Image (cartoon, rainbow, N blue to C red):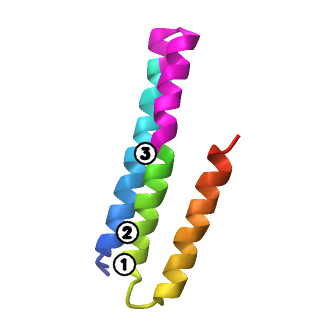
């Protein structure tokens, strides 16, 4: 009946809860300050958090799967994540 939750899953879930809570906090700050310039500064700061959370969550997941997946596939996953971040952040 009681299932143990893997540590990797707990770590990944915690990071996503943290990220989502931070997004909600930023929305409240937008309303509190009611200033477009401040909102843009806050939003730009938040834009750094997304890729960091993505990398950390992916890293935790891959470490949790390290016994089941080859090093080549792990490198492919990180290469894919790097391409996503590069594509989103490029002008």
Drawn side of residue 2 relative to residue 9, left or right:
left
Label 1 crowd (10 A; few <14 / some 14-19 / many >=20): some
Task: Find residue 66 and report its horizontal and vertical position in percent.
Answer: 39, 84
Q: From what the image shows, is residue 20 above or below residue 32?
A: below
Q: Secondary structure at mark 2?
A: helix
Q: Can you tell which of label 2 and label 3 is closer to the viewer?
A: 2
Q: Secondary structure at mark 3?
A: helix
The span shown in magenta is 30-49
Q: Which mark is residue 60?
A: 2
**Distance from label 2 to label 1 (Cα)?**
6 Å
Label 3 crowd (10 A; few <14 / some 14-19 / many >=20): some
Q: Is residue 46 magenta?
A: yes
Residue located farthest toward the front when viewing the structure as drawn? 91
**Distance from label 2 to label 3 (Cα)?**
15 Å
Q: Secondary structure at mark 1?
A: helix
Quarter of the image containing the N terminus?
bottom left
Residue tagged by mark 1?
64
Dominant SS in magenta: helix
Front residue (pair 69, 76):
76
Q: Which mark is residue 30?
A: none
Which residue lies at the image location 46% right of the left edge and 28% below the top edge?
A: 26
Which residue lies at the image location 45% right of the left edge and 43% below the top edge?
A: 49
């Amino acid at each position: 009946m009681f299932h143990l939750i893997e540590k990797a899953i707990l770590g990944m879930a915690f990071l996503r809860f943290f990220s989502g809570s931070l997004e909600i906090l930023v929305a409240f700050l937008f309303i509190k300050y009611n200033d477009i310039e401040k909102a843009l500064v806050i939003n730009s700061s938040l834009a750094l958090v997304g890729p960091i959370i993505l990398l950390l969550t992916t890293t935790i997941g891959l470490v949790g799967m390290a016994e089941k997946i080859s090093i080549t596939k792990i490198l492919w996953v990180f290469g894919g994540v790097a391409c996503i971040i590069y594509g989103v952040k490029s002008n």
